[in-house]
Amino acid sequence: MTDAVCVLVVDDDADVRDLLDDYLSEQGYQVLLAENAATARGLLEGKSPNLVLLDVGLPGEDGLSLARHIRERLDIGIIMVSGAGETVDRIVGLEVGADDYLAKPFDPRELKARLKSVLRRYERPVGPEAATVPEAEPARRVAIGACVLDLDSHQLFDAEGGEISLTRMEFELLEVLVQRPNRPLTRDQLLNITQNRDWDPFDRSVDIRVARLRRKIEADPEKPQCIRTVRGLGYMYVPLRT
């Protein structure tokens, strides 16, 4: 397979690594293997995979710490994997920037579906397709409080022009909200519009990402003015008047 999508598997269980290596290779993926966070960090220094399958319960530095390290440095997909299946692991995993969560044991078909779903969020146009963007078209920018969101470059800037890091899913959620000002949106609507239908609307994934966005754009995240909660319904973006 030419230019195969690269997946880094980080798991301290050799049997799990071998199983995932065999399965993912058969599906056409290029696979990198790491038994702990230190090995994974070393591999990430030399190569940027498209996605990381990351076990939560690693020896030494755990998967949550490694996920935070990856998210701060690389714009790639992260799927947390845990044998515990505990809700607290899922919530914390999402809070540190993971895109999805998978509990062991899992069906290989479910893994394949989740991989494809996360990878789609990180697709970027290449070759002739990328060259079709008109150079003269002005950037679409939206003021959000003291910040500015560039809808074309997928970047968020603070009042001084410094870039504020956004995950792909955080951008998608913020884009949906700012393009529908003063309109309450349910969690279900947010999932459908962003096409992240693999999220569970009954868990806290949307709430967690809204909380992360508020910490980045609100003057006081405890008293949000831009992304407001609509009690019993969902969330609404309210442009601030200057």
Image: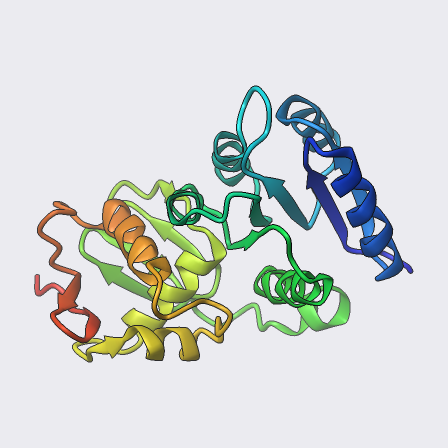
In the image, 73 versus 114, the foreground residue is 114
Q: Quadrant of residue 141?
A: bottom left
Q: Quadrant of residue 107?
A: bottom right
* Residue 63 shown left or right of residue 161 in the figure: right
In the image, 2 versus 56, the foreground residue is 56
Q: Quadrant of residue 111?
A: bottom right
* Residue 166 shown left or right of residue 26 in the figure: left
Q: How many marks?
A: 0
Question: What residue is at 72 percent from the left and 34 percent from the top?
Answer: 13
Position in image of residue 203 (x %, y %): 35, 62
Position in image of residue 189 (x %, y %): 34, 79
In the image, 24 versus 165, the foreground residue is 24
Question: What residue is at 66 percent from the left and 68 percent from the top?
Answer: 113
* Residue 121 shown left or right of residue 91 in the figure: right
* Residue 97 shown left or right of residue 63 in the figure: left
Colour logic: rainbow
Position in image of residue 229 (x %, y %): 15, 65
Is residue 209 depicted above or below 215 in this figure? Answer: below
If the image is split into quadrants, where does the C terminus sit? Answer: bottom left
Position in image of residue 101 (x %, y %): 52, 53
Is residue 42 depicted above or below 19 in this figure? Answer: above
Question: What residue is at 37 percent from the left and 68 percent from the top?
Answer: 175
If the image is split into quadrants, where does the N terminus sit? Answer: bottom right
Residue extending farthest right: 1
